[in-house]
Image: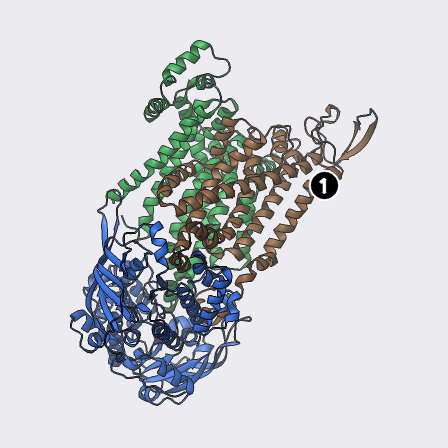
Amino acid sequence: MLDFIARRLVAIIPVLTVVAIFVFLMLRLTPGDPAAIIAGDNATSDQIDEIRRALGLDEPIWTQFIIWIGNVLQGNFGESFFFKKTVAELIAQRVEPTLALAVCTLIIAVVTAVPLGVLAAYRHGSLLDRFVMGFSVLGFSVPVFVIGYVLIYIFAIELGWLPVQGYIRIGVNFWGFLERMVLPSVTLAVIYVALIARITRASVLEVLNEDYIRTARAKGLTNRVVLMRHALRNAAVPILTVIGIGIALLISGAVVTESVYGLPGLGRLTVEAVLSRDFPTIQAVILLFSVVYVLINLVIDISYTLFDPRIRY
Amino acid sequence: MPNTMPSTMADPKKPVLEVRNLSVSLPAGADRAHAVENVSFTVSPGEIVCLVGESGSGKSVIAFTVMGLLAKALKPTSGEILLEGENILAADESRLRELRCTRMSMIFQEPMTALNPVMTCGLQIDEVLETHTKLDAAERKAKIIAILDRVKLPEPERIYASYPHQLSGGQRQRIMIAMALVLDPVLLIADEPTTALDVTTQAEILKLIAELQAGEGTGVLFITHDFGVVAEIAHRVAVLRWGELVEVGPTEKILSRPEHSYTKMLISSVPSIHPAHRGVRRDGTTVLRTEKLGKTYSGNAFFQKARVVKAAVDVDLDIRKGETLGIVGESGSGKSTVARCIARLIDPTEGKVFLGDTEIATMSARKLRPHRRRVQIVFQDPYRSMNPRITVGDSIIEGPMNFGLKRDEALDRARNLMETVRLDPNSLDRYPHQFSGGQRQRICIARALAMEPELLIADEAVSALDVSVQKQVLELLDEIRVRLNLAVLFITHDLRVAAQICDYVAVMSKGRIVEYGSAEQVFGAPRDDYTKALFSAAPGRNWEFGKFAA
Amino acid sequence: MSAISEEVVDSASIAAASTKRKSLWALALRNPAVIFGGVILLIMLAIAILAPYLGTVDPTRIDPASRNKNPGTEITYRLDDGSTAKRVVLMGTDSLGRDVYSRVLYGTRVSLMIGVAVAAISVAIGLVIGLVSGYIRWADGFIMRIMDGLMAIPGILLAIALVSIWRAGLITVIFAIVVPDVPRVVRLVRSVVLSVREEPYVEGAISVGTPTWTLMFRHILPNTIAPLIVQGTFIAAAAIITEAILSFLGIGIPPEIPSWGNIMAEGRTLFRVFPHNILYPGIFLALTVLAINIMGDGLRDTLDPKMSKKV
């Protein structure tokens, strides 16, 4: 088992290397002097010189990469001249809302989507099935910010049940936090539910066509037992896979959702950084999100072994 | 619905299964209206009834109808199915569930996919007991261990805790049998249960089924396409064609004195296991010679021991003009690896392959191309052997045109070849899907011959075909060999086919040739232990299938 | 649990099924989902082409006198020759007094163009790379590592990064959306190539001495067409959404170009009072993307049933 995890860890090194190279090259591919770009529009020439020295910009490009990656591995992403803080501090401040949003969304999505998908597959061709499929196509078709504004309009403005925007830290006021988390999470969950419900339905349907399901029926088991004991566990691996891949959607969606609901999270930070061309922050955020995404999928990869004994350590 | 629970010991005279005038309709748009039409037969206690037929005969549909597991698209339209007197067609779903695995059980063709891969074998049998009995956990476990022992699985405790993928195909089929028989049903339906297994495993499973059913007096409905299996196991035989029952009777009578012309034709098509006397080696020039040919697959990954599979080791073969050399062996024996190395579809890792005087085993792809013409191969699956998007004519002329023949000339050649393989030369502009499996295999032969090869490799080329079609293709291959004085390398797992078509036979096991000689010598007086075991496992080996005038 | 033991039908209906092969495309055009989606798309296309003739005015025309009007309001506006005219603004006006109806209709052009361009470019690039990767063994490892790396960056984030490098413009936005899509196309093409390569008919072609290029174009490439068309529709749908999101965040195409995303971005600040600025472009956007997705589902069901399980 440890061996297996070690092998998987080794396998993500090339992936992360490619990501790192891309993020590193980002700045070098932009026209103009990287040091001047980092320093921002109001920098003095002394500041620019200092940055140039810190990044080793006079060195050959691979030396620059070594310096940069060395810093990154120590958690040093440089300094944000726009926010006047180190990037690491900036990110630490902004993690909580994003994490909270992601966790709430994940819970809402999995709890609704998996049962919906299973039921749709079980009642293949029924009204429920069509509803789930219809909802799923619709969920893919409406941009997340439109869903957000529709929900705000209905539940915050017209009905007045929930606050429109804003964020309260979980430690400060838990109810206030929850209240402000409901709409963003539901908004972000829509596309995720669409994705997971669809995959769940498809993989359960596929499993229901397998020979061993026929065997299970030939044993005289009830449909419910066949579905819950034989079909669902076999369908688990593709469902897990898509939950993992869907994390990318979740991250992308968080960028938009945070902007709509004014949550001071990493997604919002990304947009602010792009608008102010704050490259150290952009680099750090992209790198961070990618690493998280890859690691989550690694964990999911490893968890396959719990569901399918054929996947060997 | 009469709710009379029949006694465990069935009345020996009363049939356990009685099918009366059963018809099952096919969905609209199929090639015929009924999958099964007006079929009647019975299975008595302690009796094995074989349902025999070629593909599309509806034999499996009958089996699934009895179990109530028919696809929704298929509907029984008339007749009745009486299981110990109770009409199953009238039973509701919950009654059917009660009957399954208690009064009637079924085992399937593919033991590899018929078991749930994520549940241990023991638990999968346990489910049956849990559903149908009130035994407690310890009693259930004891009963399962006992049945695992009865189906002769070694170390029942270990098997109980094993997942299906940890067992061999034969062992999995034993699990299926254990599951089916654990509650002593009166009827066992076996749907081609040995078709996916190797011949030695097949023999063991057939023996096991026969022993268990004789001991318990179970009635068995055994579905097969293989007359060897019929001769081995059946008490009575029912022959199906296009959903209709053409003949029923005791095995001995059907096999030796069939009445219906279709039955006669089927039985006449079964190749004999005794090789035809084809004379000694002629002094033709050697077309193919391999020297210590080997293929090793090695996969290596981080932190893992490199896995090395020796698919073929030290294979020495030679074929002369006008000869057929057969390579026989079970799955995984390496016979196809050898064929594909010789055709250079894969690169051998050791040894040499001489085509005439040219060594091609290590030749670069560029240098190899002119020699490709000299070796042609016909594959097993007629449905995947031709590009579905281009006409058969274009498929046939592709090779010759690669070697510089003009389109008109190539088409002329293709037309002649279509006649050679007895197909209409005017059908060259049709697509593969417009031909049947046997016809496609003929087209593949024509495509190979269009290259005017010196060596023709047939890699299980008749294995996917029904026995009557198989016979025609075999005759065609042999006729072409004689007429063109062609060297043929014939790869097959089917001993009967090998006996009929080969001059020389090489028996392979675990990547090595264990016995190599003339067909008469190898079949008549095998020397190697493995060969002996293989031949003695061939189903119906003691039965000489007669040739009947239709 | 309907389809259980359907293979029993198979042997009997093979003949019937195989004659269907040739008419797959005809079948796809008869699929109700394809027809439904197609008709909506045709309407959208007509709107895009005929935008100037559907009672619109210049979508970029700023009119300070009639800012933030609700839908249905009658406004008076000044013509170029100095005279005035009255006009009912169907979808209201935005905070610069531009006519939302005209902007939404012209926005159809931008969105459809982006959908088609992104799908076509990413399929073309992905096809070439995928063929190389699937067919040339030594290139495969290298190419796939890069693709895996690109796929590790969540799509919109990657697009945002690219836009931030290149600065916003229609072409840069299109390419920023293309880049994250390419690896997915590459993987699809590669998997088709790898599986078709194992088909006996390809081996048959190899053994009759067919040169690599002929093999690729004649026997392998045609198998990628159906899955690529299906994939292409989904890419187009996602691209339209991504453009809207980028523009909405203010980092997409320049705000003076009337795209649905830009209209909605403009309406953000006054959303509580004037929701129409988000509502109408939102409806158009959702309808268009929905139509493409429904059509894609229909195409997939008929052309490429094996892919259904991969979403």
Q: Nearer the viewer, residue C268 or B499?
A: B499
Q: Position of residue B435 (x, y in %)?
A: 48, 69
Chain ID, brown in image: C
Q: Position of residue B30 (x, y in %)?
A: 52, 71
| Picture layout, residue A30 above or below residue A257 | above
Name the amino acid, label 1: Leu
The quarter holding residue B519 reads bottom left
Image hue for chain B: blue
Q: Is residue B494 above or below residue B300?
A: below
Q: Nearer the viewer, residue A29 or A137?
A: A29
Q: List the residue tagged with mark 1.
A: C50
Which residue in the rendered view is the most extreme toward the right?
A: C83
Residue C206 horizontal/vertical position (percent) = 39, 56
Mark 1 lies on a secondary structure that is: helix
Could you tell me if residue B448 is visible in this image? yes
Colour-to-chain, green: A
User: Which residue is located at x 27 percent, y 77 percent?
Assistant: B539
